Image: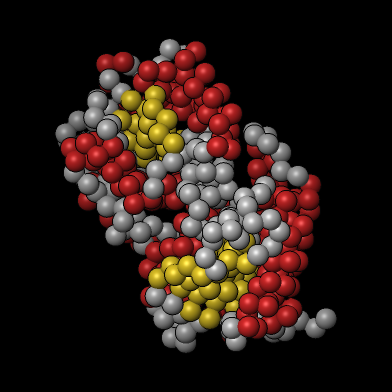
């Protein structure tokens, strides 16, 4: 592909990409935006990521890296609000972004929006600027509702998301599975969907000596089973706790659950009650949120990382864990069937049935020396997903879009 440098406007209206990971509405999408912006900047492209002011103390501009920055736009209350409440402020966000662009004499070649709320803005920017709008949904409301676990996504999201999926000039899906869901559920034409996976930062997520990792985390007793992510029913943590209750006490195992925040207090209380009911409350640690630069210690301290989700759009945690040399047990969601090498770097099961999770966790905990897979081997298995490679692939996808773009006739 060509080597022309791109000027990219990213949109993340409802969620600040530099917010606290593991809390409500701040997770894989935030990691995706920050890491991708930095890598695209290193390649010589210019990236401005726009988000809503959520705190009066927010600086207007936050430098993310070379050629990459985050810009806060005032739209509605300058505080954290429910993401659905952001919908009514989208026109203000779009106008505020346009005013900032004009005041600073900025021009962009392409708009890259994240989540359905941001896609609404992207459609208007495409019309105003005469450049293509590419969107990435990260999760699909219609799929979440079909699972029937946790809160039901509102009709406003389902209807708007479907319309935007059909009208957006181009869509980035992280997996073949999501492409099929977009086609089957929302009627998107397959040729308007490009597949570019998510990535991992191998410079940050690398193996740490297990002794050092356990001293740093305080996880220093017996076998360690790890969960990383939001505390939400859709994440299947209850299934993991039930699976943990099946494991023999001879493992002297501890389950460490990382994630949470004020908004997940009710669900955390429910999970703690479940653990007490099963008689394992003393063997489970709820750490709360952990800063990303500390996460390699937790992954390296663990003997196995479990992803029991009912739904994931991709599965970033698997890449991070394997990059740190820790095997995975996961439900077959996102792209985990292609990330995890079955029986080697972990196991992917057809459902997050607690007995199946326990069986595969037990297999990994009981590996003999001859069966042991080195941390280097596990790390090497995901190096193709390094963010530098993903940024190159996405830039190529953007160039294809630009090469074929025409301004739609109103």
Q: Quadrant of residue 369?
A: top left
Q: Residue at x 68, y 77 (%)?
A: 98
Q: Position of residue 137 (x, y in %)?
A: 62, 58
Judge whether residue 344 can be spotted in this image. no
- The colour scheme used to paint the residues is secondary structure
| Nearer the observer, 349 or 264 | 264
Is 339 positioned to the left or the right of 332 in the image? Answer: left
| Nearer the observer, 172 or 82 | 82
Q: Position of residue 195 (x, y in %)?
A: 54, 64
Q: Position of residue 83 (x, y in %)?
A: 67, 50
Is 39 positioned to the left or the right of 136 in the image? Answer: left
Q: Residue furthest front?
A: 57
Q: Quadrant of residue 71?
A: bottom right
| Nearer the observer, 138 or 381 | 138
Q: Position of residue 55 (x, y in %)?
A: 58, 56
Examine the rendered structure and indicate whether residue 220 appears above or below residue 123: above
């Amino acid at each position: 592909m060509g080597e022309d440098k791109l000027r990219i406007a990213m949109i993340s209206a409802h969620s600040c990409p530099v917010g606290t990971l593991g809390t409500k509405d701040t997770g894989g999408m935030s990691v995706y935006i920050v890491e991708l912006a930095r890598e695209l900047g290193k390649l010589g492209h210019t990236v401005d990521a726009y988000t809503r002011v959520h705190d009066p103390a927010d600086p207007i501009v936050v430098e993310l890296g070379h050629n990459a920055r985050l810009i806060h736009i005032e739209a509605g209350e300058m505080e954290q609000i429910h993401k659905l409440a952001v919908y009514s402020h989208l026109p203000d966000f779009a106008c505020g972004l346009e005013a900032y662009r004009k005041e600073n004499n900025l021009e962009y070649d392409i708009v890259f929006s994240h989540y359905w709320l941001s896609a609404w803005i992207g459609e208007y920017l495409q019309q105003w600027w005469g450049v293509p709008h590419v969107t990435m949904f990260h999760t699909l409301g219609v799929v979440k509702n079909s699972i029937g676990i946790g809160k039901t996504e509102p009709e406003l999201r389902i209807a708007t998301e479907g319309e935007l999926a059909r009208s957006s000039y181009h869509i980035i899906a992280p997996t073949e599975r999501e492409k099929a869901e977009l086609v089957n559920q929302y009627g998107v034409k397959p040729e308007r969907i490009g597949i570019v996976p998510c990535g991992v930062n191998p410079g940050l997520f690398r193996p740490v000596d297990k002794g050092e990792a356990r001293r740093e985390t305080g996880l220093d007793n017996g076998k360690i089973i790890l969960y990383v992510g939001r505390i939400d029913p859709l994440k299947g943590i209850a299934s993991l706790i039930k699976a943990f209750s099946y494991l023999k006490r001879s493992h002297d195992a501890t389950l460490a659950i990382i994630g949470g925040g004020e908004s997940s207090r009710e669900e955390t209380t429910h999970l703690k009650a479940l653990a007490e009911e099963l008689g394992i409350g003393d063997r489970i640690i709820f750490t709360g949120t952990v800063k990303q630069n500390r996460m390699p210690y937790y992954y390296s301290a663990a003997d196995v990382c479990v992803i029991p989700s009912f739904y994931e759009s991709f599965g970033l945690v698997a890449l991070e864990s394997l990059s740190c040399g820790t095997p995975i047990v996961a439900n077959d969601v996102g792209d985990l069937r292609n990330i995890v090498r079955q029986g080697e770097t972990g196991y992917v099961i057809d459902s997050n049935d607690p007995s199946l999770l326990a069986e595969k966790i037990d297999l990994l905990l009981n590996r003999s020396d001859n069966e042991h897979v080195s941390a280097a081997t596990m790390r090497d298995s995901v190096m193709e997903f390094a963010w530098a490679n993903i940024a190159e692939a996405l830039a190529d996808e953007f160039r294809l879009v630009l090469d074929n773009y025409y301004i739609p006739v109103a």
